[in-house]
Image (cartoon, rainbow, N blue to C red):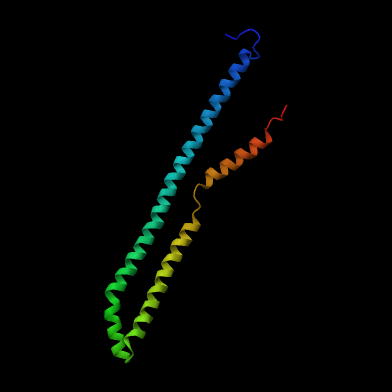
Amino acid sequence: MIEPGSHETPGTVGHVRGLIATLLRYAEVRGKLFRIETQEAGSHVTSVVSRLVIAVVLLTVAWLLAVPALVSLVAGAFQRPWEHVALAGAGVHVLIGIGFLNAAKRRWDRSPMFEETLNQFQKDREWASRHQTPPN
């Protein structure tokens, strides 16, 4: 029951309850959108990280297994010092590794995360700025 002298009316209480219910529904919808985009982002990050791990493992294994044998073979075939051959082989492996890193970066840049959530927040800000009540 409304107290005498109170500035609230039964309509005001209903309006406040309706506003609270609307805000709760709004928060629920935004939460669902955030959950969906979080799952998509997790999948994307997993994909990029797995490619980085594979690149690092392959570069390491290639370096450890092939380089000593190749250095010996090439140095003997071309009558060059093994140090020169080893440096050339290292350069080739560095270039291949840079290629994998560039591919991972391009994939990362190609898929912006939380794009729809950010768009919705921008629309909400625009709506709120149009419906702001002037100060008393």
On screen, residue 91 versus residue 23, left or right, reads left
Q: Position of residue 109 (x, y in %)?
A: 50, 58
Q: Position of residue 122 (x, y in %)?
A: 60, 42
Q: Which quadrant holds residue 38? A: top left
In percent of the image, x 51 and y 52: which residue is there? 112
Total marks drawn? 0
In percent of the image, x 55 and y 25: which residue is there? 20
Name the image quarter holding the N terminus: top right
In percent of the image, x 62 and y 15: which residue is there? 11
Front residue of 7 and 24: 7
In percent of the image, x 64 and y 35: which residue is there? 128
Name the image quarter holding the C terminus: top right
Front residue of 111 and 96: 96
Q: Position of residue 44 (x, y in %)?
A: 42, 52
Residue furthest to the bottom in view is 79
Q: Which quadrant holds residue 66? A: bottom left
Q: Position of residue 34 (x, y in %)?
A: 48, 41
